[in-house]
Image: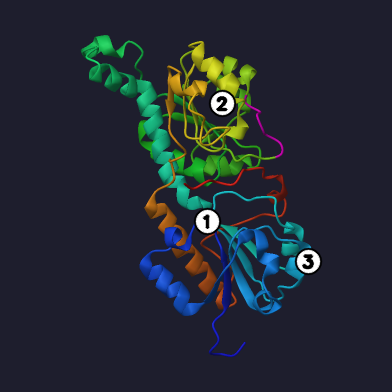
Amino acid sequence: MTNTERPLAISAPEPRTLDLIFSDKARAELHAKYEIVEADPENIAGLGDEILGKARYIIGQPPLSVETLGRMPALRSILNVESNLLNNMPYQVLFQRGIHVVTTGQVFAEPVAEIGLGFALALARGIVDADVAFRQGKELWGGEGNANARLIAGSEIGIVGFGDLGKALRRVLSGFRSRIRVFDPWLPQSILEENGVEPASMEDVLTRSDFVFVVAAVTSENRRFLGAEAFASMRRGAAFILLSRADVVDFDALMAAVSSGHIVAASDVYPEEPLPPDHPVRGLKGFIRSAHRAGALDSAFKKMGDMVLEDMDLMDRGLPPMRCKRAERETVSRMRSKPVEVN
């Protein structure tokens, strides 16, 4: 590669697009600094050796084989522009070669945390039901409409998982003077304490909380680990708020717990997306529904592109990526998230 030749980046960001994740200014910078080859994620191996041999970066997380990686001697980084890591490439080979695998998923932490707070407020104060009743001319005025209302301020809160989203959630809850307990088996106690939360067992989070927020990633160890027994152990009338991935819960058991009146709930994610029109959760009283939109803000998507450009610039100068979050060899193979879908 001559001094005047631009580094080559393979663009395979599906289900994202370059238009979605780069502002006009950032995309102009991307094309000015790099030779961009847009590719079908399912056919990276079909690219010629001239392209694969020069590729310094991959934007996306297309399926890759050991053989394909062997044809990519210049590869420095795979920049995943989703919030999850799929088990679709030989991560150990990537780590052995010193190829950085990074993700931009932390851009969603703040917007998802904010909608989580919105769910909690709506459940605590019956905001959605009160609005529906008002539209139907059945509103209850004053204290009569607050029979089941409660405050978040001074309440007991439990958080399951304490990655980027859990930390963002703690920040948005900080003004409510609540006692926050956290269960996260992948973190040492000191990190939780340094973030102003109490390390706790899963049992304590469930049984001692007025509000339970689930923000844990799906792994090989926790699929459907929150089921009927877990929901039955919660305080009667407690709120269960699901923000990460539906596979961490037994969704039928969650609906049953809400249907019985034992708990109330809100969710932004579902076992099947989009949900069929006749799915029972659509008409379930005591359940607030959101169509996987918590983090899908244009400002978050555009921040992805800025992070990618900043880290590519660092790596061009022989420095490690700093803006995106790196995949860890000890945990990446345990991830079990499904690909996101963008309509």
Left or right: 81 with respect to 148? right
SS for tag 3? helix
Which is more toward the observer, 187 or 298?
Answer: 298
Amino acid residing under circle 2: Val
Q: What residue would you read off at disc 2?
A: 205
Query: Which stretch appears magenta?
Result: 220-226
- Callout count: 3
Which is more foreground, mark 3 or mark 1?
Answer: 3
SS for tag 2? helix
Residue 67 is labelled as: 3
Amino acid residing under circle 1: Thr
At label 1, counting other C-alpha atoms closer than 10 Å, the crowd grade (few under 14, some 14-19, many 20 or more) is many
Left or right: 182 with respect to 18? right
Residue 59 vertical position relative to residue 258 in the rendered view, above or below: below
Residue 277 vertical position relative to residue 70 in the rendered view, above or below: above
Disc with the residue nearer the chain's start (3 vs 1)? 3
